Amino acid sequence: MAANPSVPQKDGKQYAEVISGNNDLIRESDRANPKIYGGPEVEAIKSWGLDSPNGLGVGELFTILQGKYFALIFLLLIIFVPLAFYGHYKIIGQRHYAHGNFLLVFSKYNIIVHWCAAVPFVLICLTGLMMVFGDKFGGGAFIRFARDVHGFATIFFAIFGTLMFFMWVKDCLFHSYDIKWMMILGGYLDKVNREIPAHKFNAGQKMWFWIATLGGGVMVVTGGIMFFQCAEINTLRLMALTHNIVGFLVIALLITHIYMAVFAIEGALEAILNGKMGEEEVSMLHSLYYKDLQKLGKLDSMRVEGH
């Protein structure tokens, strides 16, 4: 008598567990028939752990989200977030500032650490998306290679992401003026330049910093546990759920960060390439930082020649 997949078996075991030792008895022709082989097992896996005395009740949640929604959410993010910024670029346009005078805002150490963290971080995101849509890329060796790159890049990000965290954590603490920045969305919906309440990093950059460092740390830990499979099944499911949910934030804000650095403000990318920012840009977009530099008498020592 075959085990009923909808009824908990003896000792809390589910259907998939009961038949796991009998798979070799199933004919090869039947394996390709989802009505005979795939369907009942999938339904059993969905509910595995829900009624088991040793389960955490995440089996069905994991299977539904992983099977139906995670890839869809990632797809929507990589389509509609860029579309939103394309609309911003066409309607509001790129922001321009005079670039006659420059301030040296970032040191060589800042630049090196940033890029040594940023390059592997972007690789992690790209290879992660490749694995999410692995079946669309044909799977196989190509996706296994992406998985390996994902793992190696994580090691480099873990090192330089930690250095970046300690390098900028003080400057990225939130203050009351950041609320004002968020209320006006940093002035990015204005077509006229005006002073924006922000210090060395604005509220948007601070949000990205915390998502990239602490969120990235969560991704490193959860990804490592899944990669080495050093936990029991329900813990691995929780790690996968957490990994994907944090991944949504990471992908959305990475696209935002790239847009702001490359397209939203003319010459903004130069700041993290050579450390220089236009003085007018600093005085307008980071007005509180500029005023503090004035009070401390540091502006003259920070002024440098342009490109």
Image: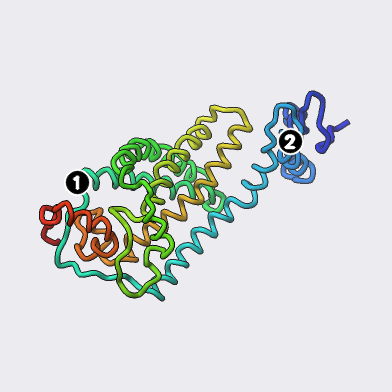
Answer with left or right where residue 76 lies relative to residue 22. left
Mark 1: which secondary structure? helix
Coloration of the structure image: rainbow
Q: Position of residue 61 (x, y in %)?
A: 67, 43
Three-letter residue code for mark 2: Leu
Residue 230 in the image: above or below residue 114: above
Find residue 9 and report its image quarter: top right
Three-letter residue code for mark 1: Lys
Q: Position of residue 43 (x, y in %)?
A: 75, 42
Closest to the observer: 71 or 217? 217
Q: Residues within 10 Å of mark 2 (few under 14, many from 20)?
A: some
Closest to the observer: 295 or 269? 295
**Residue 33: in sight, yes or no?**
yes
Residue sitting at x 45%, y 64%: 82
Closest to the observer: 39 or 48? 48
Quarter of the image with the N terminus is top right
Mark 2: which secondary structure? loop
**Residue 29: in sight, yes or no?**
no
Disc 2 designates what residue? 50
> What residue occupies the far top of the structure in this picture?
11
> What residue occupies the far right of the structure in this picture?
1
Could you give the CA–CA distance between mark 2 and mark 1, rounded to whole angstroms?
54 Å
Residue sitting at x 68%, y 33%: 56
User: Mark 2 vs mark 1: which is more N-terminal?
Assistant: 2
Residue 89 in the image: above or below residue 51: below
Residue sitting at x 78%, y 33%: 15
Residue sitting at x 84%, y 32%: 3
Q: Position of residue 25 (x, y in %)?
A: 76, 30
Disc 1 designates what residue? 108
